[in-house]
Image (spheres, helix red, strand yellow):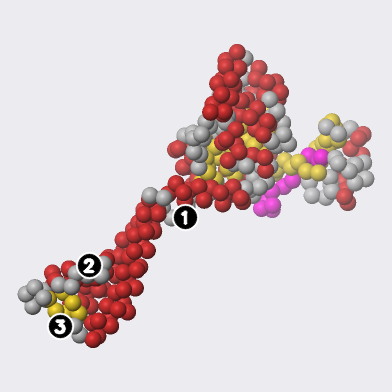
């Protein structure tokens, strides 16, 4: 616990002094190079069109230098006319050529200017764009899920959430590994490259408006510190945390975690159940997966179910109820009559399962 305390003090001091810019982002449907490519393609296409017209109508041009308009002169006149107002050494003399320059070349010149400004905005003012984009994402974040760490456990958790019906844009992944964030972004999730132990990082993802938080930072002390920070900012947030050492389960709960999971202990339980029958572990895994044939559901009692027995559920098989924080199994007398406020745990078949 002494090492955890030192990390806590160090990170709290960082929270006070940190002014680093963190950018919340979402996967773009088009890569950055695509914007540069189509801008360049438009410019080349328009210049090619102007060169072709001026070459075909070169008799309408006059070169004050040597009186002869060559193809090089046409390219020179086109580039100068399209980007500036020209120098006057080559001028249109025919009416139709002047009309073309007035009605076509001048609007194209303005279009070039807008394209150049847009390109500059894309690359030079990108930080301002990212900030605006982050504000827009933050505005939409409400009742979302915050996932800290995108290692093996949390990446599987995110995949299960999406398979169970959660929208990727309602999930925010925080990690300091850019490669992991790229994978999360490819799923459609919002991502943030930042330290989740800092207040600033959690405020960026609107932690106070989140529905739940999943923590698996790879180290128990870091995960517990994230939990402390999140609980400080969002007292009502539902927090699930993964710890690797059994001794850290109690500190995790005291840090504010609602659900504490030890993957190693759970794996040991699955291995132990296999001794009682070859199909038990498979069924438990089936229950835990959104793609299984059956699902374990937790929900509040519905008004029409009040007064009924747990055995009389119409859609699933009732296992237990939680009444005033106390669980009662299906064999207990308390489940004979459901009451308002009860939380029901039941097994339901998957919708797609015949």
Against 243, is 70 above or below? below
Q: Nearer the viewer, residue 144 or 296?
A: 144
Most extreme residue toward the left is 66
Against 29, is 336 above or below? above
- Residue 281 in percent (x, y) is at 65, 32
Q: Which residue is mark 2?
A: 79
| Among the two numbered marks 1 and 2 on one chain, the one whose residue lies closer to the N terminus | 1
Magenta residues span 343-354
- Residue 60 in percent (x, y) is at 18, 83
| Among the two numbered marks 2 and 3 on one chain, the one whose residue lies closer to the N terminus | 3
State the CA–CA distance, disc 1 to disc 3: 48 Å
- Residue 115 in percent (x, y) is at 36, 62
Q: Nearer the viewer, residue 42 or 183?
A: 42
- Residue 108 in percent (x, y) is at 32, 71
Identified at 66% across, 42% down, the residue is 210
Q: Nearer the viewer, mark 1 or mark 3?
A: 3
Q: Which residue is mark 1?
A: 29
What SS does tag 3 mark? helix
In terms of image quadrants, where is residue 49?
bottom left
In terms of image quadrants, where is residue 87?
bottom left
């Amino acid at each position: 616990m002494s090492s955890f305390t030192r990390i806590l003090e160090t990170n709290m001091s960082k929270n006070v002094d940190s002014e680093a810019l963190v950018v919340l982002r979402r996967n773009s449907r088009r890569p950055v190079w695509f914007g540069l490519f189509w801008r360049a393609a438009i410019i080349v296409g328009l210049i090619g069109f102007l060169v072709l017209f001026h070459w075909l109508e070169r008799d309408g041009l006059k070169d004050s230098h040597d009186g002869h308009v060559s193809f090089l002169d046409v390219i020179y006149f086109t580039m100068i006319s399209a980007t500036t107002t020209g120098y006057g050494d080559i001028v249109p003399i025919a009416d139709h050529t002047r009309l073309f320059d007035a009605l076509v070349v001048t609007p194209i010149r303005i279009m070039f200017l807008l394209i150049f400004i847009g390109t500059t905005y894309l690359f030079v003012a990108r930080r301002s764009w990212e900030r605006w984009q982050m504000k827009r994402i933050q505005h939409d974040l409400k009742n979302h899920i915050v996932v800290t760490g995108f290692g093996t456990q949390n990446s599987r958790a995110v995949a299960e959430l999406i398979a169970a019906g959660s929208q990727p844009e309602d999930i925010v992944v925080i990690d300091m590994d850019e490669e992991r964030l790229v994978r999360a972004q490819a799923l459609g999730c919002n991502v943030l490259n930042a330290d989740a132990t800092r207040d600033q990082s959690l405020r960026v993802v609107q932690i106070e408006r989140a529905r739940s938080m999943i923590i698996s930072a790879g180290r128990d002390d870091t995960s517990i510190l994230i939990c402390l920070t999140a609980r400080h900012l969002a007292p009502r947030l539902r927090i699930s945390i993964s710890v690797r050492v059994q001794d850290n389960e109690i500190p995790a709960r005291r840090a504010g975690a609602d659900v504490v999971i030890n993957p190693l202990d759970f794996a040991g339980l699955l291995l132990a159940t296999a001794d009682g029958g070859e199909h038990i572990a498979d069924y438990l895994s089936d229950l835990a997966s959104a793609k299984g044939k059956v699902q374990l559901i937790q929900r509040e009692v519905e008004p029409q179910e009040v007064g009924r027995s747990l055995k009389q559920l119409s859609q699933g098989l009732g296992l237990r109820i939680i009444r005033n924080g106390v669980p009662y199994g299906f064999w207990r007398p308390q489940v004979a009559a459901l009451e308002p406020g009860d939380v029901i745990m039941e097994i339901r078949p998957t919708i797609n399962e015949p």
